[in-house]
Image (cartoon, helix red, strand yellow):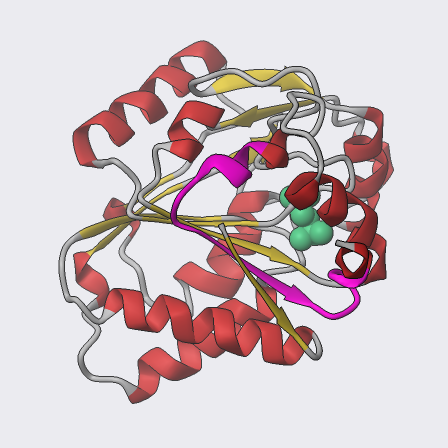
Amino acid sequence: MEINIYNDYKQMSNKAANFIINFLQSGQEMLLCFAAGDTPIKTYQYLKEAIDKNNNINTDQLKFVSLDEWIGLNEKDKGSCENYLNKYLFKPLEIKAQNIHFFDACANNLKEECLQSDRYISANGPIDLLVLGIGLNGHIGFNEPGTVKDFSHIVKLDSITKSVSKKYFSGKRGINRGITLGLKQIMGAKNIILLASGKKKAEIIYKALVGQITKEIPASILQEHENCYVFLDKKAASGLKTI
Ligand code: PGA
């Protein structure tokens, strides 16, 4: 694991976008998995700006698989992962719909949705580059504390996740479950970027990066990934000063 600390959110996002650009320069076909959430928004904006200036990157070579979704929400719901990613990533980068595999979290048969995602990764993977945020409870995707599984699965959301969800959409939506890739699929990614910004993430970043590796802090398993690159701003890294 490599930990990089930057002055502020903008600088962190800029460096993360540069890392992604360098990665994409190889021009090969790739499977990517980019998290939704507030943290990566600026990274995706810088990525779009950089791709516009760089003729070497052919986005038609890129395939995407979704990391997670709130069960009961879809593209039409502002704040769903699909809505976020379309708005900040796929529409700006003009990624063709046929190159994106989303979980349909409104499907009648959610187990089949999990299997379809697993099959997509088996057929097109492993994931070449995975961009993750981290929840205040240490979740990655919706691998919630103590509930992690290897492959795509449905999960009862932790109370912290449910409370945080109110920032994306009205808490009245009554969201209780999520659908997510599993930890084996996450750890099977060839390269991982973990992004965290702000003082509110300092404590969980400390626990995840320096603490014991435990299922209670799902992100702590990233300590075992050889190609995990952590991008933090100073505030999110403030708990690490004590190392
Ligand atoms: P955030 O979400 O980027 O909106 O903080 C991170 C997460 O819960 O994984």
Give me the residue at 51% from left, 45% from top.
82
**Quick one: 108 or 155, which is closer to the camera?**
155
Q: Residue at x 26, y 22 (%)?
A: 119
Quadrant of res 189: top left
Q: Is residue 211 above or below residue 112?
A: below
Horizontal and vertical percent position of residue 65: 36, 40
Residue 172 image-quadrant placement: top right
The x, y position of residue 137, in whole percent, is 77, 35
Q: Is residue 95 among the parts visible in the rendering?
A: yes
Q: Out of 43 and 193, give the one closest to the viewer.
A: 193
- Residue 206 shown in magenta: no
Percent x, y of residue 148: 58, 18
User: Taking the image as drawn, is residue 109 in sight?
Assistant: no
Where residue 185 appears, as percent x and y from the top left, is 39, 28
Of residue 13 and residue 235, the one placed in the foreground of this image is 235
Q: Which residues are magenta?
A: 221-238
Relative vertical location of residue 46 with respect to residue 82 in this rendering, above or below: below
- The number of discs equals 0
Farthest-out residue, front: 243
Is residue 243 found left or right of 16 in the rendered image? right
The reply to whether the magenta stretch includes residue 230 is: yes
Which residue is depicted at the point 57% across and 72% down?
A: 13
Against 78, residue 156 (above or below) is above
Question: Please, which residue is most extreme toward the left here?
Answer: 28
In the picture, measured across the screen, residue 52 lies left or right of residue 153, that is left
- For residue 40, which quarter of the picture? bottom right
Image quarter in which the C terminus is found: bottom right
Q: Is residue 182 above or below residue 7?
A: above
